[in-house]
Image (cartoon, helix red, strand yellow):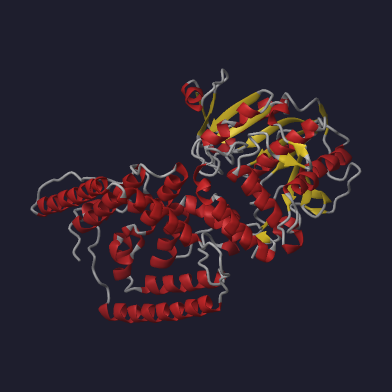
Amino acid sequence: MANTNDAGRAPFKMADPGELASNMTKVMDALAALAQEMADRNNAAEVKPGRLQPFENVSKTFTALSQDYMKNPERFMQTQMQLWQSHAQLWHNAWERFLGKDVEPIVTPDPGDRRFKDPDWQENQIFDFLLQSYLITARWAEDLVENAEGIDEHTRHKANFYVEQIANALSPSNFALTNPEVLRLTLESSGANLVEGLENLAEDIRAGKGSLRIKQTDFDAFAVGENLAMTPGKVVYQNDLIQLIQYAPTTEQVYSQPLLIVPPWINKFYILDLNPKKSFIRWAVEQGLTVFVISWVNPDERLAGKTFADYMHEGILSALGAIKKATGEKKVNAIGYCVGGTLLSATLGYMAAHKDSRITSATFFTTQVDFEKAGDLLVFIDEDQVEHVEEEMADKGYLEGRKMAGAFNLLRSNDLIWSYVVNNYLKGRDPLPFDLLYWNGDSTRMPAATHSYYLRECYLNNNMSQGKMVLDETPIDLGKIKVPVYNLAAREDHIAPLPSVFKLGQFFGGDTRLVVSGSGHIAGVVNPPETGKYQYWTNDQGADTLDAWLDGAQEHPGSWWPDWIKWLAKHSGKKVAAREPGDGKLKPIEDAPGSYVRRRAD
C-alpha cells in the first residue's frame, strides 16, 4: 500500500519480506496455542444453569429495540435510506478525491478523540475512507437508538451504552491492517510487534485466569508504603473492617477539631496519598489538621455477612470513638469520598435520629445520595442484573474486585481498554509506569451482604433520597442532617455525574456550599494547588437547578483545595499544640499505611 500523503512521512514499506513471513507464522502458531488454551479453560469452567449471562441482557435489550422498529417498518426503511445515502456520498467523494479534487469530509472525529490522531487518518485516502465509513455507521447506530419510540428510558439507556461499546470495539484503530500507525510499525519491524503483542496477550489472559486482564501499567514499578501512600503516620486502631490511621503532624500547632476521611471501600484509600506531590492527605496535614483516615479491609469469605450497617458501626462510628481516645476531642469534621460519602450521609442521618452530634461538618467528594441521575452505571442495574450479581457473590461470599473494575473501565472503554489493546497487543509495547493506573488495578472485594444492600437500596430503589432507607431499625431522614456541608462535584465525572451530585444539597437540612471542579471523578478531586491545573466554579447565591447554578457561577483558576481549607477552618476550632500518634489513650499498632491496604484481591 503506497502512502499518498504529502506530510513527508516514510511510506508503508516492507523492511524484510522473509522475516515478516516468519513472524506471521509465529503469530499464527501463538494464536492457535492460545485458542486451544482458552477452549480448554472454557470446557473446564462450570456455568450454573438458570443464571442470566451478561450477553443475554445485551440480547434482550437489542431484541426490544428491533421489535420497536418492526412495528413501524417504514420508519426503519427511512433510517436505512439515510445510511445508504451517506455511504453513497462517501463513495462519490472518494472518487472525486482520487481525481485530484479537494473534498470536504462528510464526517470528522471529535477533536479530543485520540484514536485518530495519526495524520494518515485524514491525509491517506484509504484510511480517511475507513475512518469516515466507521463514523457514519457508528453515528447512524446511535441515532437508531435515540429515535426509537416504543421503548422505556432504561432500555434506551442500555441500548445506547451497548451500541457505544460495540462501536468502540469495531473501530478501525483496533485492527492491525486498518490502523496506519500499527501497519507502519508492522512493516518496519517485520511483524515483531505482533509477536511481542501475542506474548503480552497470553500473559494477560493467564493473569486473569482465563479472562482478559489488560495490563494498564508496570505493576513492578510501585509498592504501597514505598513509593505510594508515603505520608508518615501510625495505625492507632483496628477491627475486622478497618484500620484507622493517624498522620504525624508537620506544624507546631493544629486545629483542635480532628478530620476523619472516609474513602470508598470499592477502592483503596491511597488515591488521596499517591505520592508527596499529589497527596491530599499530606497537604491537609500541612494545613494544620489532625488527619485520620479509614483504611478498609480487603474482605474475603469470612466477612460475607458484613452489612451496610456494619460498615457504619465498625467503620465511621467506631472511628469516631477511637479519635476521641486518641485526641480527647469528641467533635470531628468528616470527609466522605464517593460511596464513602454515601455511607457518611446515611451515618449522619442515623446520628441525627439518635441525637449524636459528634460530626460537626461534612465534606463530600463526588457523592450521590439520590441515584435517579446516576449515569451510565445505571446500565448495570435492573432486577435481572442485580440478581445475577447476587448469585455470583453467593459462590464465594463477596464480589471479586475485578468485576467492579471491569465495569468502571467500560465507562471509558476507549481510554481504559482499547488504547491498551492497541499499545500492548498490536504495537507489542509494555505500558508505562503510572501510579494512578496502579491504584486503579489494585482492586478490592465487596462483602455480599453490603454490596447487595448498596445496589438495591441506592441504585435500584433509590431509597435513601426517598426517606425509605433503614439502618438498624432507624429510618434515615437526610432532612434531619443540619451540619454545614461542603459538596464537591466534578464537571466531567462519569461515575458520580454532576447532575446527580448537585442534588445532594437539596436533601440535607443545613447549609450546603457547592463547588464544581474541572475534570472528572479522580483528577477533579486530586488536584494539588502547585500544579495549577484545571479550575473550579462557585456560586455564592446558589440556585434551585444545576443550569441556573452554572449560569451564575464564577470560574476560578487552579485547585479548589485552598477554597475548602478556608471553609473548613471556620469549623475546626482554635489552635492547640500538635498531637503525635500515640500521645493519647491509643498506642500505635504499626506504621502507616498499615497492613489492610496491602492485601491484594488477586
Q: Left of 150 or right of it: where is 343? A: right
Q: Relative to 269, is 17 above or below? A: below
* Tally of marks: 0
Q: Quadrant of residue 175?
A: bottom left
Q: Position of residue 123 (x, y in %)?
A: 22, 52
Q: Position of residue 59 (x, y in %)?
A: 42, 58
The one nearer the camera, 149 or 162, is: 149
State whether residue 601 appears in this view. Answer: yes
On-image quarter of the C terminus: bottom right
In the rendered image, the residue lying farthest to the front is 71
Please name the residue shown 20% across and 46% down the image: 105
Q: Is residue 425 above or below residue 545?
A: below
Residue for point 32% across, 44% down: 143
Quarter of the figure with residue 247: top right
Q: Is residue 414 above or below residue 46?
A: above
Query: Is residue 442 visible from the viewing direction of this image?
Result: no
Quadrant for the N terminus in the image: bottom left
Residue shown at 38%/71% (left/top)? 194
Residue 145 located left or right of residue 585: left
Q: Nearer the viewer, residue 432 or 504?
A: 504
Camera-side residue: 578 or 141? 141
Where is residue 53 drawn, in percent x and y? 51, 63
Image position of 71 with respect to 13: above or below = above
- Kindly identify the residue that appears in the image at 62 percent across and 25 percent down: 513
Q: Depth check: 392 or 184 in front?
A: 392
Residue 526, position in %: x, y? 59, 41
Q: Looking at the image, which residue sits at the far top?
A: 541
In the picture as drawn, the residue positioned furthest to the right comes out as: 585
